[in-house]
Image (spheres, rainbow, N blue to C red):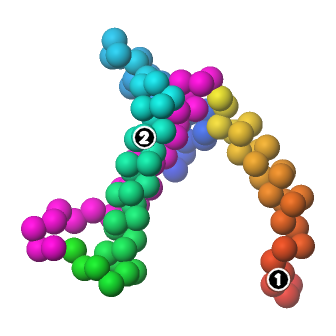
């Protein structure tokens, strides 16, 4: 099964199956927050290399923003799993809030 065929529940289950094979299990919420911050920094570095004024050094390994976003997603899923949060429910709550709060905030395209 390829990634595009996974729904949020399946993705959370896949990560849980992977993490559950290790005695250490999930990191603590504090450690996971630090990992999200670390991964966000790595994404920022890639964005700066691609869109900013700081080119990569010749000695630096090539990475993609896709790879860095995937790393962030993995850590977020670990965080949600460790706290028993259903990401589909969390996303629905967030989208409802955004769709209500920001419905008139931006200029709509003509249809």
Instruction: Please identify the residue farthest to the left as the structure is shown.
Output: 59
- Would residue 9 be visible to someone looking at this image? yes
Q: Is 61 colored magenta in this rendering?
A: yes
In the picture, residue 81 is in which quadrant?
A: top right
Query: Which percent across, then down, holds residue 39?
Result: 39, 50
Q: Residue at x 39, y 80 (%)?
A: 51
Q: Is residue 55 left or right of residue 47?
A: left
Q: Is residue 4 above or below residue 54?
A: above
Q: Residue at x 38, y 48 (%)?
A: 38
Q: Secondary structure at mark 1?
A: loop
> What crowding class fits label 2: few (fewer than 14 Cα within 10 Å), some (14-19), or many (20 or more)?
few
Residue at image mark 1: 107
In the picture, residue 2 is in which quadrant?
A: top left
Instruction: Please identify the residue farthest to the top as the structure is shown.
Output: 23
Distance between mark 1 and mark 2 Cα atoms: 36 Å
Query: Which percent across, then down, holds residue 27?
Result: 42, 25
> What crowding class fits label 1: few (fewer than 14 Cα within 10 Å), some (14-19), or many (20 or more)?
few
Q: Is residue 10 left or right of residue 3?
A: right
Q: Is 25 colored magenta in this rendering?
A: no
Return the mark for residue 34.
2
Q: Residue at x 27, y 62 (%)?
A: 63
Q: Is the stretch drawn in magenta largely helix, strand or loop?
A: helix
Stretch of the chain drawn in magenta:
57-84
Q: Quadrant of the C terminus?
A: bottom right
Q: Nearer the viewer, residue 63 or 56?
A: 56
In the picture, residue 54 is in which quadrant?
A: bottom left
Say whether disc 1 or disc 2 marks the residue closer to the N-terminus: 2
Query: Which percent across, then down, holds residue 55?
Result: 25, 79
């Amino acid at each position: 099964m390829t990634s595009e065929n996974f729904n949020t529940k399946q993705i959370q289950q896949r990560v849980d199956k992977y993490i559950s094979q290790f005695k250490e299990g999930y990191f603590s919420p504090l450690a996971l927050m630090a990992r999200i911050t670390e991964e966000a920094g790595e994404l920022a570095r890639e964005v700066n290399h691609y869109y900013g004024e700081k080119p990569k050094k010749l000695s630096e390994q090539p990475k993609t923003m896709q790879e860095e976003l995937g790393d962030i997603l993995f850590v977020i899923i670990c965080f949600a799993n460790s706290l028993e949060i259903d990401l589909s429910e969390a996303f629905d709550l967030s989208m409802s809030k955004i769709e209500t709060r920001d419905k008139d905030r931006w200029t709509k395209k003509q249809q």
